[in-house]
Amino acid sequence: MTSRDILAQLESLTTEAFRPELAEIDRLPTLDLARLMNGEDAGVPAAVGTQLPRIAAAVDAIAERMGRGGRLVYAGAGTAGRLGVLDASECPPTFNTAPGQVVGVLAGGPAAMVASVEGAEDSRELAVADLEALALTPDDSVVGVSASGRTPYAIGAVEYARTRGALTVGLACNAGSALAAAAEHGIEVVVGPELLTGSTRLKAGTAQKLVLNMVSTITMIRLGKTYGNLMVDVRASNEKLRARSRRIVALATGAEDQEIEAALTATGGEVKHAILVLLAGVDGAAAARLLEESGGHLRAALAAAAG
């Protein structure tokens, strides 16, 4: 594709549109600029709201596959790809996901988290190579993320994933995008032109972050990683998280500090197990067995313990 072709493509995108009414914003006082940006951002959740049925359908399909041992893979370039890496990196400490269970694949590799990697986003072949390294299966789900919806890397990732039988989702911020069309589940959050022409790290980036939050969080809820609104699979890897673990057990059970410490000690610090010990009156070994038999769902394990 020539530079002229790419320019014509960009000029047709809502996310790249020029807004003449903002042509002199650099003359505004700082507070007025802050108010302007805040007003722009206020419309993003409503734009996400138009896509909720599509998001929910994608989440249900992802959760079904992850329940069979599949992985959730985000693939993108630039800001979109970095947001995928961010969301993936937050799943282990929040939901105690296994290494490699949620993966962020970024055009250009880890170096692209902090610097642009020339030409990486334009390569479908690079996306194929990156996903080939993961040995995708039909139980995996690949979410291509691109504000424009035309990024070759994201489209290439989705197209390759479909050849491997994996579930595919395309998240874009323009209507009628090639990315959404390439995926089984297309999600198009149209937030309109940016405050700075073409700077899709702004409203488009915020929209993508909101959607990725939904995808990972609701998927984990469906997988039994929470109990009510408590993160019962949290991994206590530092003192703050150890304190949070104790608080979660307290909120779930109403037990006294001494009982909580004893339960956590008996279960090797596993929050979900400790809650089951306290609420069901079983020992650590029985709690582990009940949770394994219930697929990690605490409510199901409690029901089983109650007979």
Image (tube, rainbow, N blue to C red):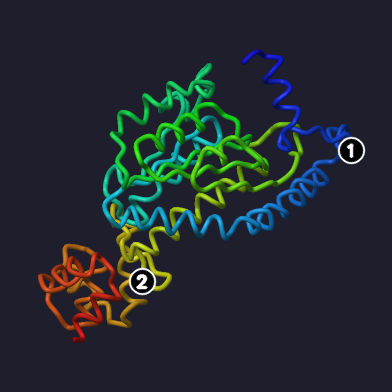
Quarter assignment of residue 290: bottom left
Picture coordinates of residue 272, whole percent (x, y):
26, 68
Does residue 305 appear to the left or right of 48 in the view shown? left
Q: Identify the image quadrant of the N terminus.
A: top right
**Depth order, front residue of 50/108:** 50
Q: Which residue sits at x=41%, y=32%?
A: 160
Residue 256 is tagged as none
> Which residue in the protein does label 1 denote?
21
Q: Residues within 10 Å of mark 1 (few under 14, many from 20)?
A: few
Does residue 240 appear to the left or right of 150 in the view shown? left
Q: Which residue sits at x=75%, y=27%?
A: 11
> Which residue in the protein does label 2 denote?
227
**Depth order, front residue of 260/183:** 183
Numbered disc 2: secondary structure:
loop
Picture coordinates of residue 275, whole percent (x, y):
26, 74
**Depth order, front residue of 208/251:** 208
